[in-house]
Image (cartoon, grey):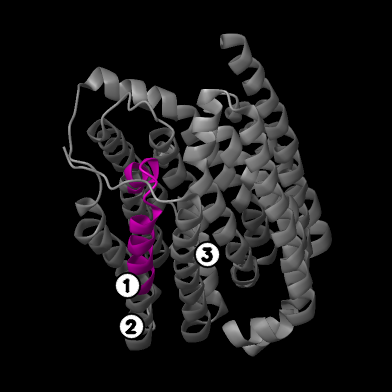
Amino acid sequence: MFAMPAPASLRSNFVWTFAGNAVYAAGQWAILSLFAKLGGGEMLGQYALALAVTAPVVMFSHLNLRAVLATDVAHEHPFGDYLMVRAGATLLGLAAIAVLARFSGSATMATVVLAAGIAQSAENVSDIFYGALQRAERMDRIARSMMARAVLSAAAVGAALWLTRSIVLAVTALAIARVATMLAIDARTGEKLSYTNLRNQLSIGRTALPLGLVLMLVTLNTNLPRYAIEERLGTRALGAFAAVASFLTAGNTVINALGQSATPRLARYFEEGGRAHFRGLSLRLMAMAIGLGAAGAAAAALLGAPLLRLLYRAEFAQYAGLLTAVMGAAIPIYVASVLGYVITSARAFDSQLPLFCVVAASCAAASAVLVPRFGLAGAPMALAVAACVQGGGEVVILHRAWLRREAAR
């Protein structure tokens, strides 16, 4: 059996996770910027639409197995079983994306959708190796992989766009870069593979299935305003919103670093019944989320226009007001995201599904009403409505999880 290194400190894990997520987010930002600068608003919109079409399927096949693995502190199942479940779900997801690609309109758009699905599916496979490292609290090794993937992906897209100005070749290059990183780096990381049997793997799948549905609904919730924009305002407007909404990624970099670093420790506190420690760490995470969102909104109000002009093109400066609205909506979004990590650490899996059905329904209704009425400004309003519904539901779920935990003792 491969021997994992000793766990790092929570502070060290946060620093490494933040660094890895920061470089990865910068890479994602660079890709959007390259599409905007070298391809224009229409090409950026096509890329954003391909991601919006494929992301719900990819997230369903993801099953959030990383969270299930990272919180399996008792090592109930070997790593190989988790890997087999992830591989099978990913193949099914790719088959579904291939079907979606056939109905995506032009041959160009169909190819872009399929290539985007392959790129995201490769990340899914990488993610399960990250789960083993996260359970061992070795976030430094995850961070190094994320940095390599970000740099290679951005370089591949930039080279393809510079040489060809073709969205098909650019997204194909992205897929190749993601697959190469997964095979060369991530497949060599983690524990020695060992398997049990199909029955245990199906058991993992049943445990994770509600989380897969939740992830699909979360991603659908994020993309519902984008679907409304594309339908009502067109692909170019969708590209503009995608460029502005990418600033949410900066805050999510910190939120993900906090949540991923704290999840194994929160899971141990919950398992051991350490309610005071669990509550204290959860409240600190929420306070950081609120502070981060407020700082982002203030920065957007002061620096929005020059940032958009610098990162994209001069014409994007007209969306400075939209950027401020997006970052204002980020406050409830970040709090809800933190609470998501908290309830997942308590392994409250099944109860998340009905909540996110309600969240998706609220976002769909808000998007249908607000985007036609307010244009692009209606999209962040819809996201804020959904985040408030999500956060309230997560508080209820967490309270019930502790009641069950106390009753079981």
**Closest to the observer, 53 or 282:** 282
Where's the C terminus, which quadrant? top right
What residue would you read off at disc 3?
Answer: 48
Q: Position of residue 328 (x, y in %)?
A: 77, 61
User: For the N terminus, which image quadrant?
Assistant: top left
Q: Cβ–Cβ below 8 Å for labels 3 and 2?
A: no
Q: Are marks 3 and 1 in contact (CB under 8 Å)?
A: no
The image quadrant of residue 68 is top left
Secondary structure, mark 1, is: helix
Q: Earlier in the sequence, mark 3 or mark 1?
A: 3
Disc 1 residue type?
Leu
Q: Residue 282 at what x, y percent from top left?
A: 65, 41
What crowding class fits label 3: few (fewer than 14 Cα within 10 Å), some (14-19), or many (20 or more)?
many
User: What's the magenta region?
Assistant: 130-152
Front position among marks 2 and 1: 1
Spatial CA distance of label 3 from label 2 is 19 Å
* Residue at the spot 26% in from the left edge and 35% down from the top edge: 79
Residue holding disc 2: 159
Disc 2 + disc 1, Cβ < 8 Å: no
Q: From what the image shows, is residue 172 above or below residue 11? A: below
Pointer 1: residues within 10 angstroms few (<14), some, or many (20+)?
many
Q: Reply yes or no: does residue 270 show up in magenta.
A: no
Does the magenta segment cover residue 146?
yes
Q: Is residue 205 left or right of residue 29?
A: left
Residue under numbered circle 1 = 152
Amino acid at the residue labelled 3: Ala
Q: Secondary structure at mark 2?
A: helix
